[in-house]
Amino acid sequence: MKKQLVRNLRRHAFLRRGCVAVIAWILLLSALIPTASAAAVFPPDASPTSVYLEGKEILEGECIILKSVTYVPLRKFCNLFTDCSITWNAKTSTATVKSDALTMTVQSGAIYITANGRYFYTVGEVRNLNGHLYVPIRPLAKALALSVEWNAKQRCVELTPEGSIRAASPASYNKDELYWLSRIISAESKGEPLLGQIAVGNVVLNRVDSPSYPNTIYGVIFDRKYGTQFSPVSLGTIYQAPSASAVIAAKICLEGYRISDTILFFLNPKIATNHWIEQARPYAFTIGNHQFYN
């Protein structure tokens, strides 16, 4: 009798251990297999919007507006338009999208993406929402050769293919323009945030577009009509090699992006020796240590 009781107890203990192991295995599998609950969790200030491709809605329920910028999920958006592979670098928080005609990098937290050597300003930063990269739609559409229109009445985005190849054309920046624009940005705003460096580049290009200044980047930088316009010219720092971020800022500017198309002046009030701009020109905004004026 005692031997039978011992055998029964051992059998029950074995069964209990087996059940525990099975339950643990099921829980592990459920954690590894994506489910509907793994969808991106949107910030409380985000609002839903719709995106249409040639009149047909795409990515229904997955597109949002955040701080006036329309965002779409990177992987699903790209897979709609091109047969691509997407890899993730956890160290740099960067996704790389590759197809036969496109190489694109998208970094979480960045305010630009790259596509075939070109740099596209995103306006809003790239966001990682619960493991899903969400990217502003305009630069992403440029990378995939899509035109974008905002339908204000319907509060939606309308996309139209620009050609049969779903990829931006390769980079072809004018070497002379990139050379001088990157150097003046670096000399004037090294150490400033990228957004501030872009704004310095905007000042130069806005002057190029203005009838009151020379019509080339080189001409604007070395303009002496009313005295030296930029102190790095007289100091000689204009000839120093530009920082990597200044080159990126210059490329973003040469793509046509403007934080403002009216700013023509800037100064750092902490180190400026002449403050006439503050009295004579309308103030626009401040980024980092620089104040910008129209």
Image: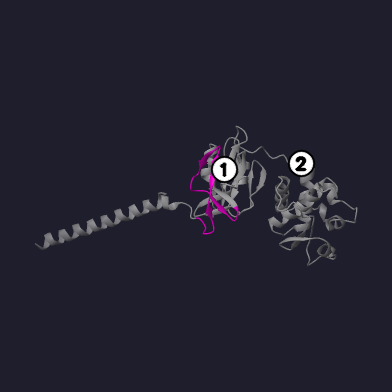
Q: In this view of the protein, can residue 87 be seen by the observer?
A: no
Q: Secondary structure at mark 1?
A: strand
On the image, the x and y values in percent for residue 31 come to 39, 53
Q: Is residue 164 depicted above or below 141 in this figure? A: above
On the image, the x and y values in percent for residue 261 come to 74, 51
Instruction: Please tell me which residue lies in front, 215 or 114.
Output: 215
What colour scheme has been applied to the protein in the rendered image?
Answer: one colour
Q: Is residue 143 depicted above or below 93 in this figure? A: above
The outermost residue toward the left is 1
Specify whether 91 is left or right of 180. Answer: left
Disc 1 vs disc 2: Cβ atoms closer than 8 Å?
A: no
Say few, some or many: other residues with alpha carbon within 10 Å of mark 2 (under 14 / 14 to 19 / 20 or more): few
Report how far apart the C-alphas of labels 1 and 2 lie in the structure: 26 Å
Q: Which residue is mark 1?
A: 97
Q: Residue at x 30, y 55 (%)?
A: 23
The outermost residue toward the bottom is 270
Q: Amino acid at mark 2?
A: Asn
Specify whether 90 is left or right of 198. Answer: left
Q: In this view of the protein, can residue 220 be seen by the observer?
A: yes
Q: Is residue 48 magenta?
A: yes
Specify whether 29 is left or right of 227. Answer: left
Q: Is residue 15 magenta?
A: no
Badge number at residue 231 = none
Residue range corresponding to the magenta coloring: 42-68
Q: Amino acid at mark 1?
A: Val
Q: Secondary structure at mark 2?
A: loop
Say few, some or many: other residues with alpha carbon within 10 Å of mark 1 (under 14 / 14 to 19 / 20 or more): many
Instruction: Please tell me which residue lies in front, 218 or 164.
Output: 164
Q: Which residue is mark 2?
A: 174
| Sequence-first disc among 1 and 2 | 1
Quadrant of the frame with the C terminus: bottom right
On the image, the x and y values in percent for residue 108 come to 58, 53
